[in-house]
Amino acid sequence: MKRFKLIAVVLFIPFIICLIVYSNGGKKMNAKSKLVFFELGSKGNSTLVETIDDKGNPIYGIIDGGKPINYTKQIEPYLTENKISKIHFIIVSHMHDDHVGGIDKLLQSDFVNNETTIYLKLTPKSEHLTNYAKLKEMNIGVIEPLSVPDNIKTNNEVMSSPDSIFQTQIKYYSKADGDYANANMSSNISFGEFTITIYNGINWNTHDVVNEDWDENVNSLTCLLERKNSKDDMQRVYLSADLGENSGENSTDGRKQYSMVIGERISQIVGQVDIYQVAHHGFYFSMNEETARNLNFKYAVVTNSYNEIAYKGIAKFQKKYPSISETEALDIGTNTLKALFSSEHLVKILFADGENYGTGPTAYELIKELQPSNRYVLTRKDGYIKNGNITVELESDITVSQ
């Protein structure tokens, strides 16, 4: 009988140890965390972040919210169907409608309350969000640069600026802390298994490198999400929002491609990642080969539609340059996608909306234009690119599915 009790105790100990490891609240738990990149149709960004708290309960955050119609048709139904009742944090990358429109709707919902924190860059365009957050007594995380630069005028000045200009600090304000009068400081966001670091806290429209005050893409906050797996390896996901879009493509001076250059400079600081959400949805003139080499990603997530990239690219550049052929126009229109192949670790490119519209080249033919082999692109059996929500599951290994 004593021998039987001894065996039972020995067998029971590993089970207890497993429970302790799972529930210890540390970053090395072998529990599931994941990201869902929503398929929003033509273009737009919204990413759901799921992890667990120190008691093993699931917690959720949203980075951008697409357009208002995307919240109604894609995001809210997903939250409801998956029995997600609360969003614990919201990050607003910038104030374009295809990123913040759905956030406006989310703030009006029961998914957020006074325990939700909204993170954003404080500019005149974002003031209405902070006002609404205060009405709901939410917490507010204001993103600012670690150091404020002098006026930056050229690309060379962007590339030679210290890291601290692109790194950020977070000022936390709450209703409970002096009615939003006092702030607590932090260098990143701790969220379950994730550490989230935000870059690009500058309001670039106050600098001469940006000579068009309507531009908002260059103000995009970018997010690095990091998590240690059970093997103590760091898993890294980088979301670049719209930073990289080249609003200065026609410039002949040092302002040319300013947003792309800022994106490249930050990629030097971020370094190698596993997952890269491609700048400006994968549009042309959104990133360069240097950025791809710096990030050296395994998986690239394109949230734009094939129709936007291929057909509208062809139409735009043939109108702009009437003498070029359709093939040449496609070559220009897909320069961002081709830049992805500069990553030495590239395994797959995933299109949130890979459907083929119109009568021009199919998605499969587009990829043949980009690379002789289509092994880099997640396709259906018939060769067409897959479309739909892209799910990245982070456990001991990384699993990407669509």
Image (spheres, helix red, strand yellow):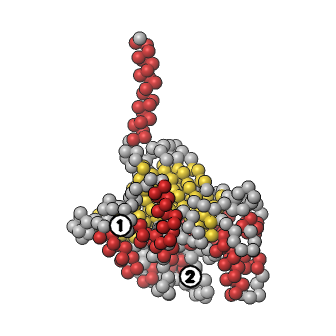
Residue 318 as seen in the image, left or right of residue 103 = right
Location of residue 253 (image quadrant)? bottom right
Secondary structure of residue under mark 2: loop
Q: Residue at coordinates 61% horizontally, 86% vertically from top-left?
A: 250
Q: Nearer the viewer, residue 288 or 120?
A: 120
Where residue 84 appears, as percent x and y from the top left, is 43, 55
Task: Give the vertical position of 269 relative to 26 (above or below).
Answer: below
Disc assigned to residue 61 = none
Disc assigned to residue 247 = 2
Kindly give the residue lying farthest to the left in the view shown. 178
Kindly give the residue lying farthest to the top in the view shown. 1
Q: Nearer the viewer, residue 226 or 315?
A: 315
Q: Nearer the viewer, residue 218 or 85?
A: 85
Q: Residues within 10 Å of mark 2 (few under 14, many from 20)?
A: many
Identify residue type, mark 2: Ser
Q: Residue at coordinates 60% horizontally, 83% vertically from top-left?
A: 249
For residue 100, say whether it is visible. Answer: yes
State yes or no: discs 2 and 1 in contact (Cβ < 8 Å). no
Give the quadrant of the C terminus.
bottom right
Residue 139 as seen in the image, left or right of residue 194 = left
Disc assigned to residue 141 = 1
Where residue 373 appears, as percent x and y from the top left, is 76, 60
Report, in whole angstroms, how far the alpha carbon at label 2 lies from the one at label 1.
Answer: 28 Å
